[in-house]
Amino acid sequence: MLTPTTTPTVVRPAAHSPVRAPAAGSAGLSASEAPNARHVARCSTCAMRHLCMPQGMSAEELPKLEALICRARAVRRGEPLYRAGTPFENLYAVRSGSLKTTMAHRDGREQVTGLRLAGESLGLDGISSDTHACSAIALEDSSVCIVPYEALKRLCRESGTLQERLHKLMGEQIVREASQMLTLGSLNADERVAAFLLDVSERNAQRGYSSAEFNLRMTREDMGSYLGMTLETVSRTLSKFQKRGLIDARGKFIRIVDLEGLRDL
Amino acid sequence: MLTPTTTPTVVRPAAHSPVRAPAAGSAGLSASEAPNARHVARCSTCAMRHLCMPQGMSAEELPKLEALICRARAVRRGEPLYRAGTPFENLYAVRSGSLKTTMAHRDGREQVTGLRLAGESLGLDGISSDTHACSAIALEDSSVCIVPYEALKRLCRESGTLQERLHKLMGEQIVREASQMLTLGSLNADERVAAFLLDVSERNAQRGYSSAEFNLRMTREDMGSYLGMTLETVSRTLSKFQKRGLIDARGKFIRIVDLEGLRDL
DNA sequence: CGAGGTATTGATGGGCATCAAGAGATGTGG
DNA sequence: CCACATCTCTTGATGCCCATCAATACCTCG
C-alpha cells in the first residue's frame, strides 16, 4: 500500500556525491520513475503488487488499490511536500530521494521530527485533525506516490489486509517516535549520534540498500535539530567517531566501519 | 469507543491528598465504577453511548460496540496493565486513575514515555508488532476498559464512524509524541516543566476536570524521566515556579496560579 | 570564479547532572 | 495509634557536558 514504486536494488548515486555507493541486493524489479514527467506521473510499471501487499490480498482487490495509488509527485530539494497547518488529504510514500519532517513550537522554534527514506511513508501527522501537524521538506530532488486518504479509508473497509497494513504503519510510527523520545531523553551526544547512524543503517538494510554506507542528505544542522543538539556538537561527534575508527565520514557520505563499536557506545 | 465509562464531573479525591480538588463541570452522567468487583466488572451503566461515539453512529451499530467493550479491569498502584514484550491483544481506556507508559533502552535504561489520565486510551504501542513496545504501570489504583483489538478491527470494517475514531486516536498519539520530541529536543528545564504542567492542565480540561488544579500521581523521578531531566531539577524548577507565584505545589498536588505566566516562559 | 551555504575546530561559560544530607510523606506491624 | 522503615522530596555544593561565540576551510552551484 504505502510502499512506493521505488527501486530497492540500486543505491541511487547522489548528484555531486564525492563517493558512489555500490549496488546492493537484487530484488529483480525494474525502475519505474519518469524524472521528466515532473508533477504528475503514472506509476506505469508500478511494482505495487510485489511490494505493497506481500501478505495475500485477494485478486479482485488489487485493481482497486492500483487505481488508487497510481499517482506520483516530484518535489525539488528544499521544497515542501506539504506544510504544517495545511489541509490533510493524502498520505505519501517516498519513491526516490528523502525528506525531513519538521514541527514548529508555539514561539516559532522549529525542529526536525523525522527523516523519511525511499520506501517509507509520510503524512500520518495529518490524520488526527485533518490538518498537517508537520511540514515535509525534500532533502534532495525526490518523488513520492500519492495516496488519497479518503479513498484509502474506503478501501480499508473492503480489505482486511489493507486495513491491517494501515494500522501497522501507524503503529510503527508510534513506536518509532516513542523510541526517539528515549534517544532525546536518555542518551548523551555520542549515544544519540550513534543511535541515529545505526537507525539509518538499519532502515537502509530493510529497504534493500546498503547498511554500511549511505548518503545522508541532512545537513549537520538538521541532524542536530533532530537529535536535540547543536550542529557543532554533531560535527565534533562525527569527527571523534572517525578518529576512533568507528565510521568514515566525508561530508554527507557516511560509511560505517565498526558497527559493533557504535552499538557499544 | 475508547472513551471509557468514567465520571468526568467529579475530581476523584486522592487518598492521602492534602488538598481536595473541587468538582468541575456537570455532564450529567452517573458514576459507574464498581470498586469491589476487582478484576472483571461489567460496565453496567456504561455511559458509552454518550461518550464514545458523539458523532453519529447508527442505532444498529451501537449494541455491537457495547458488547465489545463492556469489560473492565482493575490495576493496583505500581502494577503493570501490560508489559513490554508481552503479546498485544487489547486496547484500553482509562476509566479511573492514571497510568504511565515506560520503554526500555537496549542497555536496560528505562524512561517514562507517556502519562494516561482518566478518559484516555492506552495500548496502541502494541499494534505494529503484535507485541507491546511499552509497559503500562498504574500510578494509583486504577480501572480500565478492555477493548479486544481483533474484534475492534472487525467492527471498524462495518462502521466508518468507528474506523474514523480509531484512526484519529492513533493520529493523535502520533502528533502528541512528535510534540513531546519537540519538548525534549528544544526546550530548557523551565520550559519543559511548564509545558508538561500546561499539557496536563489542558487534558484535564478536555475531560471535564479542573484545569487549574490536579493531583499528579507521578513522582518527581517519573516526571524527570518523562522530561529528560533529573528529579532534582524537576524539584528545583517547581520550587522556583512556586517562588515566582506561577504555581502552588504541595507534593503531588499542583495548583496553577498564573497560566499565562507559565505559557510565557 | 566567486558567493553563500555548510562543515570543522577551538576557546569559553552556563545549565543541569551528580553527589550529599536532611526533611517529609507513606505504609506496616506491633 | 504510634514507631519505624522506606520511599519521596527538597535544597545545597561541585563539576562536567554541551551550547555558544568565533574563525577558517570547504563544498556547491549560479
Image: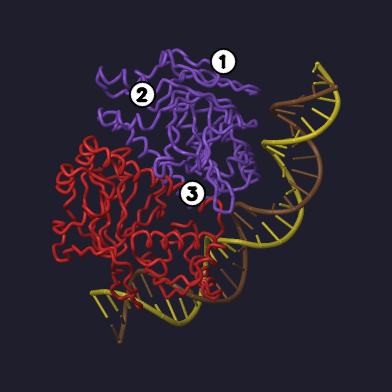
Chain colours: A red, B purple, C brown, D yellow
In contact (CB < 8 Å): disc 2 and disc 3: no
In this rendering, do the residues under marks 2 and 3 share a single chain? no
Q: Which chain hosts label 2?
A: B
Q: Is residue A233 above or below residue B242?
A: below
Q: Chain of mark 3?
A: A
In the rendered image, the quadrant that contains the C terminus of chain A is bottom right
User: Where does label 2 land, which residue?
Assistant: B52
The kind of secondary structure element at disc 2 is loop
Image x and y of residue A77, in percent: 27, 64
Residue at which label 3 appears: A181
Give the class, few, some or many, for how many residues have Cα within 10 Å of label 2's Cα (few <14, many ≥20).
some
Residue A89: % across, % down: 23, 43
Alpha carbon distance from label 1 to label 2: 25 Å
Name the element at disc 1: loop
Q: Is residue A69 left or right of residue C3?
A: left
Label 3 – label 1 distance at C-alpha: 38 Å
Residue in the picture at 30% in, 19% down: B62
**Looking at the image, is A58 positioned above or below residue B137?**
below
Percent x, y of residue D19: 53, 60
Q: Earlier in the sequence, mark 1 or mark 2?
A: 1
Observer-side mark, 3 or 1, equals 1
Question: Local crowd at mark 1 within 10 Å, few (<14), some, or many (≥20)?
Answer: few
For badge 2, the amino acid type reads Cys
Q: Which mark is residue B36?
A: 1
Image quadrant assignment for residue B43: top left
